[in-house]
Amino acid sequence: MILRVIPHVGAILRGEAATDSGARARSSGEELTPADDQAVVAAALVTLKSRDGGFDLAATTRGVVRAREVVDLARQAGDASAARQVMSDGLWRVFDLLQAERAAHGVRRQGTSVVVGAEVVAATRDRLAEQLRIRLACQGERCEVAGVVLRGQYGQQRWDEDWIIRRSADATTPASGGVLSGRCPQCGAALRIEADGSCAYCRALVLAGGRDWVVWSIEEAPW
Amino acid sequence: MVIVEDVIGGILGIYALAWAVALAFIVFLGLVLVVSRGRSDAGRDVFRRAVAAGAPRGAVRRAGRAGSPADTAIAISGLQSVDPSFDVTAFLDSARVAVGAYAMAHSAQDDRLLRRITTSGYWQTPNGKAVAAAIAEWRRYAGDRPGATNRGRMVLDISWRQPEVKTIALGDQGMDRITVRLASVIAGAAGPDWRRTDEVTRFDWDFVRPAGQRTDPRAVLLPRICGDCGAPYRSDLDDACPYCHAARPDTQAGWRLDRMYLVVGT
């Protein structure tokens, strides 16, 4: 046993030095990123609106809440394809990996929840991309089980989730409402995504963030 | 008789020495755990500096050692001037797939996707060798049990924090190279009692492609349907068509993971 460990001591030490684990991981890296100053966020949203006259924060927030419902249903059903229509390509590939891993271990997600509040806690724009971090206050039950409870607990709880949406700096809000409204940003048709991530009608790549907001990242506080 | 006694004494001495060394080694590993996972940030910082100083070349980077944001923006502009279809959002999005592939290899011992998106050179780096060694250890233990799933370990969630392009080098030894720094967050559980094994690790990831290659905007996704027989793949982890067994191509928009460095620092 010890002889087997000796060749890997260097890798073990390097891993320990670069990794926060256990309680330290939960208290540092996994926690939600602190909100930016509200004045800075408000100014960024004004700038965003001045560049993109069609941008409507309330409609965008509703779209994110809808996206959360879509992803939640996909998690409950263990069907990654159901979440394809709102996630960026890379995020969905990782989501798909996770669903396969969870299915292999018989992990089931239980409980339902609703969004009871939403707030933009960060808005950034650079030459290449725009990004909004929307903090959703959620209420309900969430629990993951595989024979035993792996995380979460039964009973009503409240928690926050950060949903980060992103689009190219050149993108503007489509007249149809776009991806978060369930519409293709290119042709305006009801969004139906092919296996390769393109619109089933016009074949445009709509989930790479080049044309419209897509869900770019989902961050949850440890649970 | 005296010789026999000396031989027996020697054997006992070596036996006792081996136990002493083994115990000292266990105590050493225990101390490492106490220092690296303890409450003291100062002790942990000293430990990190010591490990960084003693790490082999190409394994570890110190936090803060990277290009400035302004330099990076200029470098991205330079890249877009020769490759107008390059989009940093799409690039980072595909880099995220590498995070998922690494998490599956590191935490669930399933390296099928990681092998498809890495260069052969990745497996010669210290961190690539560490991943390969851990998986080889699992396979020795698993033997010829059916399926690739490690029933004793599972990944519950994979996410990242604060991904950013740190450096871009074009035409470096015939390759274009982009370094992305991020913290990978892996929520996992290990049997038999499914205790949580959450980890947050900071990495620099180096992605490369042949110099002069241009971005194909449509090549962002792994094919979901076999090009030969049209059958669907079951998951991203499939290396070949489950029906006709044709090899599955993997595009990653031309970029492959070539190196990863653990980022050490406070």
Image (cartoon, rainbow, N blue to C red):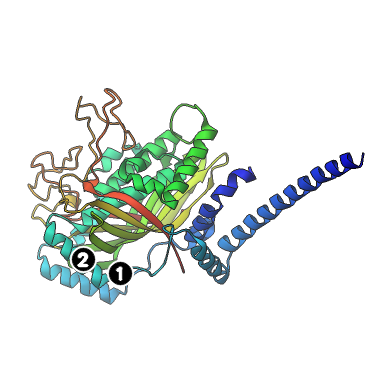
In the depicted structure, whether residue A116 falls above or below residue A37: above
Disc ID at residue B67? 1
Please state which amino acid type lies under the numbered disc 1: Gly
Residue B58: quarter of image: bottom left
Please state which amino acid type lies under the numbered disc 2: Ala
In the depicted structure, whether residue B24 falls above or below residue B227: below
Discs 2, 1 touching: Cβ within 8 Å: yes
The numbered mark, 2 or 1, whose residue comes first in the sequence reads 1
> Are discs 2 and 1 located on one and the same chain?
yes
Q: How far from the left and from the top, in percent, is residue A137?
A: 35, 59
Q: How far from the left and from the top, in percent, is residue B73?
A: 21, 68
Q: Mark 2 lies on which chain?
A: B
Mark 2 surroundings within 10 Å by alpha-carbon count, few (fewer than 14), some (14 through 19), many (20 or more):
some
Mark 1 surroundings within 10 Å by alpha-carbon count, few (fewer than 14), some (14 through 19), many (20 or more):
few
Say which of A88 and B125 sits in front.
Answer: B125
Say which of B248 and B130 sits in front.
Answer: B130
**Cα–Cα span, label 2 and label 1:** 10 Å
Q: Residue at x 20, y 53 (%)?
A: B211
Q: Which residue is drawn at 37% across and 65% down?
A: A33
SS at mark 2? helix
Q: Residue at x 49, y 60 (%)?
A: B55
Residue B231 in view in this figure? yes
In the image, is A153 to the left or to the right of A5? left
Task: Read off the residue under disc 2.
Answer: B75
Q: Which chain carries label 1?
A: B
Q: How far from the left and from the top, in percent, is residue B60?
A: 44, 60
Residue A209: quarter of image: bottom left
